[in-house]
């Protein structure tokens, strides 16, 4: 019974986590949402006034990285693991637009990436893992057996994210969400350390006009070929 590593990268709100969760359930794999880890570090930086709209105190954040402990705890009712920052459940707080607006600044810092990549590599050392993010196929697991790269039009992606936030009861403007989605992709793709890009051997999925069921079936066929 062979276990593999499935790496899913792509632009923001392309449905990476939806596919990843379905795969983890079907194959009984561990799912790791690496975006949640960068979001939790961003929340920590916000709470300590190391980052805001107009400033970033990189030095203080780097000095305090050792005080950040990130853990995932599986929630049976939800069917996935929730993010804990220093033993506090931050799953809800890390999904706000405010965190989304600051996370790309924080995730561009090399020392932050170094810490999180090391933790991610440790989680995947026994395989049987689905990990989604921006640099999984390129940096975290360059030897992953299956690499997917997800894309979709900015409008479709912003619509998805907007619905998610509205359904949670957040008051947000569609144009702010659209701007954030595009701005994050721009910063993530142009940063020096581990920019978002398709690994050479990744399979690209444009799901602008593809339903989740069809997409999942196609991806499962790819997984089955590797087992
Ligand atoms: O996946 P999600 O949209 O929650 O990711 C939030 C942000 O975290 C991304 O926009 C990116 O700046 C950062 N990130 C990253 N590398 C990863 C995962 C996320 O830089 N592997």
Image: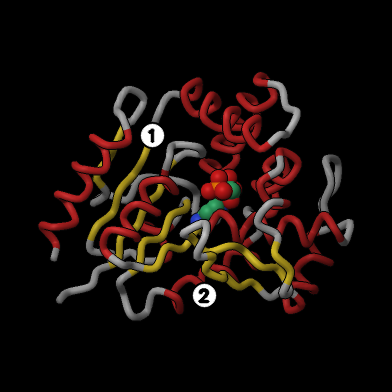
Residue 122 position in % (x across, y down) = 45, 79
Residue 132 position in % (x across, y down) = 43, 54
The quadrant of the rendering that contains the N terminus is bottom left
- Seen as rendered, the residue at the extreme front is 77
Residue 12 position in % (x across, y down) = 51, 39
> Position of 159 compared to 89: left or right?
left
Q: Which residue is mark 1?
A: 151
Q: Residue at x 40, y 54 (%)?
A: 21
Judging depth in this view, the residue of 49 and 109 nearest the camera is 49
> In the picture shown, does residue 11 fall above or below 74?
above
Judging depth in this view, the residue of 102 and 36 nearest the camera is 36
Q: CA distance from mark 2 to mark 1?
A: 26 Å
Residue 184 position in % (x across, y down) = 60, 38
Q: Quadrant of residue 212?
A: top left
Q: Residue at x 60, y 73 (%)?
A: 71
Q: Residue at x 69, y 24 (%)?
A: 176
Q: Is residue 192 visible?
A: no
Element under label 2?
A: helix
> Position of 156 compared to 59: left or right?
left
Q: Quadrant of residue 49?
A: bottom right
> In the picture shown, does residue 54 fall above or below 58?
above
Q: Which residue is mark 2?
A: 118
Q: Is residue 113 visible?
A: yes
């Amino acid at each position: 019974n062979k276990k593999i590593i499935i790496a899913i990268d792509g632009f923001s709100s392309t449905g990476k986590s939806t596919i990843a969760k379905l795969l983890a359930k079907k194959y009984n794999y561990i799912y790791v949402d690496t975006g949640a880890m960068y979001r939790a570090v961003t929340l920590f930086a916000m709470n300590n006034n190391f980052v805001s709209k107009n400033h970033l105190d990189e030095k203080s954040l780097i000095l305090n990285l050792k005080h950040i402990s990130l853990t995932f705890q599986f929630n049976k009712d939800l069917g996935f693991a929730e993010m804990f920052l220093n033993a506090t459940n931050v799953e809800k707080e890390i999904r706000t637009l405010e965190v989304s607006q600051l996370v790309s600044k924080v995730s561009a810092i090399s020392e932050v990436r170094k810490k999180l990549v090391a933790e991610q590599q440790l989680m995947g050392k026994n395989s049987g893992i689905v990990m989604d993010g921006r640099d999984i196929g390129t940096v975290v697991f360059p030897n992953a057996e299956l690499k997917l790269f997800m894309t979709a039009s900015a409008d479709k992606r912003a619509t998805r994210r907007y619905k998610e936030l509205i359904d949670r009861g957040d008051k947000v403007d569609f144009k702010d969400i659209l701007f954030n989605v595009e701005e994050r992709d721009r910063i993530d793709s142009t940063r020096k350390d581990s920019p978002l890009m398709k690994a050479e051997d990744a399979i690209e999925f444009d799901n602008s006009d593809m339903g989740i069921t069809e997409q999942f079936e196609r991806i499962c066929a790819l997984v089955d070929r590797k087992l």
